[in-house]
Image (cartoon, helix red, strand yellow):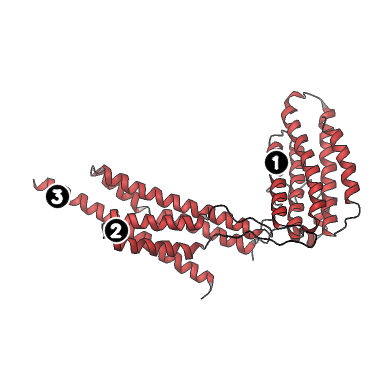
Amino acid sequence: MGPSTTRTLAFVALGLLLLTSSCATLFSTSSYAGDSESIVFNE
Amino acid sequence: MSNDDFQPRSGVKFGGAYSPGNTDTAMRGNPVARLQSAKVFDKSARRANAGKTRAWLIVLLTLPLVLSAIIAMLDGNAFAAMRNIGLFALFCFAANTIKSGIEAASEYDAREFASAPKFPRKIIGSALLGFGLLLTCWTGWGIGLFQSLGFGIMGAAASFFAFGADPMKDKGYTTSTGVTPQMVIDAVSEAEEKIEGIELAGAQLKDRPLRDRVNRVTKRARDILARIEQDPSDLRRSKKFLVVYLDGALEATQKYARTQNDLGGEKDVYIKFRSLLDDMEREFDHQHEKLLTNDRMDLDVEIDVLADRLKAESRL
């Protein structure tokens, strides 16, 4: 496995980590927002 | 292989070897000289461009943080919004730091003699990415601190392997004539500052043919610098040539740029300055060829002759 392949694989791994954490934050924020909305509605 | 990434050290957008009005016959007639004066750029340029694109992809991949900030704002959650925007800004800053580290490493790779960059920006950028990941996982995603630390370390390591380390040591060798790497680096930096000064002053000239002449002079000066880097044993003589000519060209160009508006219809000054630039261009071409052929015999004499002329002509 050459240096170029290593760099590419490392970047793919980095990309997955960033995308996962950002999307998880987005879902977490959306579900928190959704929950608080339903609480207000139920009241 | 395409030549899109090939950028000679002396390359300019206009006024290149095959542009109209160009009299770069020394280079045109000497393909070996063209190659010698160019940076060996294609592989490292492609890698640098790929690295910079990847650095900006980091910004794209963290865009969901902006969306989550908007959702938090709509929900009335100011702290969550600020946190998410702050995290996105941290990732942008890290990407920018890595990008500038890639540019510095590319410049270092392109030269024979180079100082290591002052700050290891790629390593700092990778550490910032890891820290940003840690904060995003811990505060945004809401997983535990240890898991977030694990993600942060993985992210920093992945970034380090993706973008590489910064150059840490100065580059170069001491020649048989006693020229050290630091002497070369100092001479080249000093000359480059003067060339940039000439280019800045040249950009202010309103007359296009004069601007073109200034561009050709600075282009040839850069070729000479490239030649010094490749063969620094001639540094002492080349340095004298560069100091005398570049100082003279800088002073004359700055003076003309400052006073061009006040000249009115004074053709004399314009013709004198144009003739000075033509002679300098011819002399730079001549000296460059002499450096290439290692002909040192007449260098000193010719430097002194034109130095006297520059002293006389700079009183424009």
Type of amino acid at the residue the image marks with label 3: Ser
Q: Left or right: where does residue B59 sit relative to residue B9?
A: left
- Give whichever of B23, A9 is nearer the camera: A9
Residue B122 visible here? yes
Judged from this view, the residue extending furthest toward the front is B178
Q: Element under label 2?
A: helix
Q: Which residue is mark 1?
A: B199
Residue B25 is tagged as none
Judged from this view, the residue extending furthest toward the left is A43
Q: Residue at x 72, y 40 (%)?
A: B198
Chain to which mark 3 belongs: A
Asked if marks 3 and 2 fall on the same chain, the answer is yes
Asked if marks 3 and 1 fall on the same chain, the answer is no
- Give whichever of B286, B121 is nearer the camera: B121
Relative to B146, say whether A33 is above or below.
above
Q: Left or right: where does residue B243 sit relative to residue B304?
A: left
Q: Name the spot of residue B184 as percent of width and height, x first.
A: 72, 54
Q: CA distance from mark 2 to mark 1?
A: 51 Å
Q: Which residue is mark 3?
A: A38
Q: Earlier in the sequence, mark 3 or mark 2?
A: 2
Q: Mark 3 or mark 2, which is nearer to you?
A: 2
Q: Element under label 3?
A: helix
